[in-house]
Amino acid sequence: MDNGARSPSKPDPRQRVAGPLFRVIAPLVRFVLRRGLGEPNVLLTVRGRVTGQPRSTPVAMWELGDRRFVQASFGGEVNWVRNIRASGEAVIRRGGWSLAVHATELAPAEAGRLMHDALAGFHRRRLARFLLGPTVRPPAAILHRYRFQVDDDLEAYVAEARRAPLFELVPQEPPTTAGPRPE
């Protein structure tokens, strides 16, 4: 029985479009974020594991109470994920606000439970699930900000956390500001 899942060697067509599209618009997103716009996105700067040079990429930051998270919405094998796993540290930035953080990858079961519980009260959008297909998911930060969910069972969120790791960001020291803290 076909459950809509595709083999790793044959990615969903939506994934083949999303990656290149993101690479094209990423410079524009970085420009917007440097000016303090574009919530819930931030610039995540991580030291490269090979070059040692700082590398910045826009990511959606999920603020849940006093906790912050970023999710690898394009999967766990993208360079910023490899870099953050190697260094365990990053800087998040939006406009004049920045914060040095320690990054800890959550286990899929813990991340899945966190996403499931935080999004449980939101309306499930069947149209979004249809359009996104079985494998493409917006980061939890986007789902939370716009108050909807795509999946509704815990197993689906754990599977998503296996595919798209979730990292908790804990401040290294008090934030440095030239403006207000992002909300």
Image (tube, helix red, strand yellow):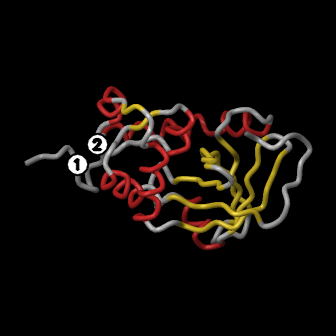
Residue 81, percent from left and from top: 55, 61
Mark seen at residue 134:
2
- Image position of 99 (left or right of 152): right
Give the tally of numbered discs.
Answer: 2
Q: What is the C-alpha distance between the residues marked 1 and 2?
A: 6 Å
- In the structure shown, which secondary structural element does the residue marked by tag 1 occupy? loop
Residue occupying the far front of the picture: 121
- Which quadrant of the view contains residue 167? bottom right
View extreme (right): residue = 178
Q: In the image, is residue 170 above or below residue 72?
A: below
Vertical placement of 36 versus 59: above or below?
A: above
The amino acid on which the numbered mark 2 sits, given as a three-letter code, is Pro
Q: Are marks 1 and 2 in contact (CB under 8 Å)?
A: yes
In the image, 30 versus 180, the foreground residue is 180
Question: Residue 89's x, y, as percent?
Answer: 69, 67
Label 1: which residue? 5
Instruction: Specify the amino acid type for callout 1.
Output: Ala
Q: Quadrant of the C terminus?
A: top right
Quadrant in the picture for residue 123: top left
Location of residue 150 in the rendering, given as x and y in whole percent from the top left corner: 37, 38
